[in-house]
Amino acid sequence: QVQLVESGGGLVQAGDSLRLSCAASGRTFTSYAMGWFRQAPGKEREFVATISGGSGGWTTYADSVKGRFTVSRDNARNTVYLQMNSLKPEDTAVYYCAARGSWQHAVSPSLYDYWGQGTQVTVSS
């Protein structure tokens, strides 16, 4: 069982930056690929970024955030991060961290086993 707790959300202006953190419980953090997803009001949950297990050598990003967001992991702290730069109003959503019981990263939310409670990110224009 893995428990995930996100933090770092908030209200910012367009062009600002935020860094989201996701702290994971458990002693096998390195064996999990991690993902970030988001859900805006009235919309389905969508993929944002994912990072492979182990040292996190493989990452994939949604086209909408490529070049602005960076996912990383610190295995010593059992934490995965999402650095978000040049934020836009359309980035406003609840952001969720997820863990997949596989080393291989994935973009489909159905492939993830554990989810955090989410953190709100609001970007004003």
Image (tube, rainbow, N blue to C red):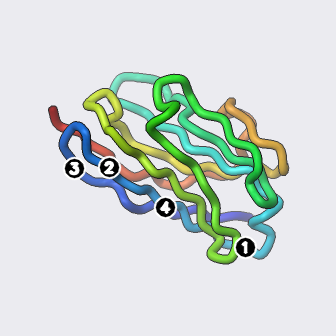
Instruction: Give the number of the disc on residue 21.
Output: 4
Which residue is at 52% across, 31% downward?
66
Q: Which residue is mark 3?
A: 11
**Count of numbered marks:** 4
As rendered, which of 66 and 114 lies closer to the eye? 66
Which residue is at 64% across, 60% downward?
73
Helix, strand or loop at disc 2? Answer: loop
Q: Which residue is mark 2?
A: 17
Q: Earlier in the sequence, mark 3 or mark 1?
A: 3
In space, the residues marked 2 and 1 are separated at their CA atoms by: 30 Å
Q: Earlier in the sequence, mark 2 or mark 1?
A: 2
In space, the residues marked 2 and 4 are separated at their CA atoms by: 13 Å
Q: Earlier in the sequence, mark 2 or mark 3?
A: 3
Say what amino acid the circle numbered 1 marks: Gly
As rendered, which of 100 and 86 lies closer to the eye? 86
Q: Which residue is mark 1?
A: 26
In the image, residue 25 lies at what x, y percent?
65, 72
